[in-house]
Amino acid sequence: MCLFQYDDDPEPEEPDPAGLLYVPVRSGTHAVAARVFRTPLGGRTAVGFTTVDRLIATLGAEQPWTRLSEPVLRALAEPLGVELLTVDPTLTARAVTGPRASAGSPRTGSDARDVGHGARTF
């Protein structure tokens, strides 16, 4: 027997939409682009934060950001083959650089940070 009734919600286990997020960006040639990160297992993920304080605590005060809704962030990430969205990650690791990184490792460049621990992914 279920303890709770979900009249309007056909999928009660699904996470709520993230809403308006603070999204880390990087400057491009003619515009800014949402940054893409890697999960601890190496998958690519878009990242958003529910507060600017959480973004700063994770990525630093110098990280540029913009406000985007979850659907807009997903739409920007989809053409890149990124289907995962991570909200409020609390741990990042620096990009792998140096001779070992260039020896066949795909983890170089601006999307090479790991995100994880404490984040909601959906």
Image (spheres, rainbow, N blue to C red):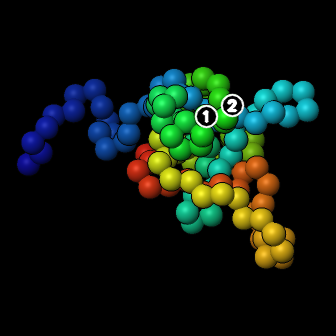
**x, y percentage for residue 122?**
48, 46
Q: Position of residue 84 (x, y in %)?
A: 57, 48
Callout 1 secondary element: loop
Q: Compared with residue 74, is residue 97 higher up or lower down, i.e. above or below? A: below
Disc 2 is placed on an element classified as loop
Q: CA distance from mark 2 to mark 1?
A: 8 Å
**Picture residue at 55% right of the left edge, 63% below the top:** 40
Query: In this figure, what is the number of numbered marks?
Result: 2
- The residue pinned by badge 1 equals 61
Image location of residue 89, percent across then percent down: 49, 47
Residue projecting furthest to the right: 29
Residue type of the residue flagged with mark 1: Ala
Give the class, few, some or many, for how many residues have Cα within 10 Å of label 1's Cα (few <14, many ≥20).
few
What label does residue 51 carry, if any?
A: none
Relative placement, left or right, of 42 versus 20 is right
* Residue at x 77% of width, y 65% of height: 97
Q: Which residue is mark 2?
A: 64
Asked whether residue 75 is in view, the answer is no
**Residue 79 x %, y %:** 75, 41
Q: Nearer the viewer, residue 16 or 36?
A: 36
The type of residue carrying mark 2 is Pro
Pick the front one: 104 or 18: 104
Crowding at mark 2 (Cα within 10 Å: few <14, some 14-19, many 20+): some
Q: Quadrant of residue 105?
A: bottom right
Closer to the camera, 105 or 56? 56
Looking at the image, which residue sits at the far front? 61
In the shown orientation, is residue 36 left or right of residue 59? right
Left or right: residue 119 versus residue 55 is: left
